[in-house]
Amino acid sequence: MPQENTGPVHATVEASDCMKCHEDVVFTLAHKGKAHKEICLECHRGHPPADMQIIPECNSCHDEAGQKHFALDNCMGCHVNPHTPLVIKLTRNITTPCLTCHTGQFEQLQEKLSIHSKLACTACHNYHGQIQPCQNCHLPHSDTMDSNSCKKCHMAHQPLVVAYGEDIVSEDCGSCHTEVYGVMSENKTKHRGVTCVSCHYETHGMIPACQKCHGQWPHPTEILNKFTNCRECHGMAHDLMATDYITNVFRK
């Protein structure tokens, strides 16, 4: 006669046994599991029906002391699948969880207020790590600008702080400053061949002194004593022939 089973049966389960029933989960872990790869039994210590509480709390492993991100109480709000922990899906109104790590970006947004300061982080970053082209929301200044052109002058978290290097072509400036660009294009003096950023360098709106290029004493002392402002004779730097004085001189 077969022996009657009088006690519980304890089976030894290996990680390789999980694939026999959970092939899709093991496959997902192998390709997108990152640090969760091959740790089935470290998270799931039991199995139904003997153990119905097989889903562990995230902070049973992720409990880094003093780190604000690990103090959040809704991990699954972003990390929707623990088998793909870095595939993070975000709704369009999330900000607070982002700030537990990305404090620098938030400080920039608050230091120089703009329309971007009023947006939730995920209004622009639809998934974690995404940097989308500015043209998804903003029209470019001109048809010649590509997705990288904006970054030459604008920082995404401080868009109104316009700063640039020497690689900005004058056509980009002229797309906003159309009148000035038109005057410069028709200028007959050497300024016509000078790029905008050669004079208005580093910071938008910067107006240099004429002496930056022309030296401290471009004329004899007698002339400098009589005319203390370069514009009295030369007019605007964009149209050096614009004043009545210089026009009358050339007419004689």
Image (cartoon, rainbow, N blue to C red):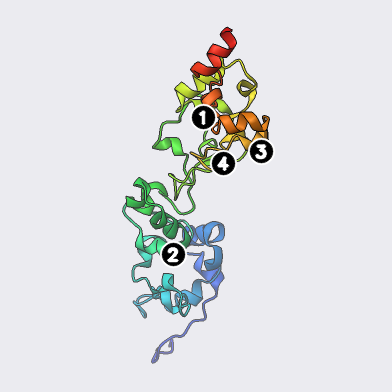
Q: Is residue 84 visible?
A: no
Which image quarter: residue 234? top right
- Please say if the residues under marks 1 and 2 sit with CB atoms less than 8 Å apart: no
In the rendered structure, find residue 173 and report the number of the disc placed on it. 1
Q: CA distance from mark 1 to mark 2?
A: 49 Å
Dot 3 amino acid type = Gln
Per the image, the residue denoted by label 2 is: 82
Instruction: Identify the secondary structure beneath mark 4.
Output: loop
Left or right, residue 18 beside residue 216: left
What residue is drawn where x is 41% and y is 31%?
Answer: 139
Instruction: Reply above or below: 237 against 162.
Output: above
List x then y, in percent, for residue 73. 34, 71
Instruction: Identify the secondary structure beneath mark 1.
Output: helix
Dot 1 amino acid type = Cys
Task: For the C terminus, give its image quadrant.
Answer: top right
Q: CA distance from mark 3 to mark 2?
A: 68 Å
Per the image, the residue denoted by label 3 is: 216
Task: Point out the tag, 3 or 2, that comes first from the N-terminus.
Answer: 2
Instruction: Reply above or below: 36 against 172.
Output: below
Dot 4 amino acid type = Tyr
In the rendered structure, find residue 164 and report the number of the disc placed on it. 4
Task: Point out the tag, 2 or 4, that comes first from the N-terminus.
Answer: 2
Task: Point out the tag, 1 or 2, that comes first from the N-terminus.
Answer: 2
Task: For the N terminus, give its image quadrant.
Answer: bottom left
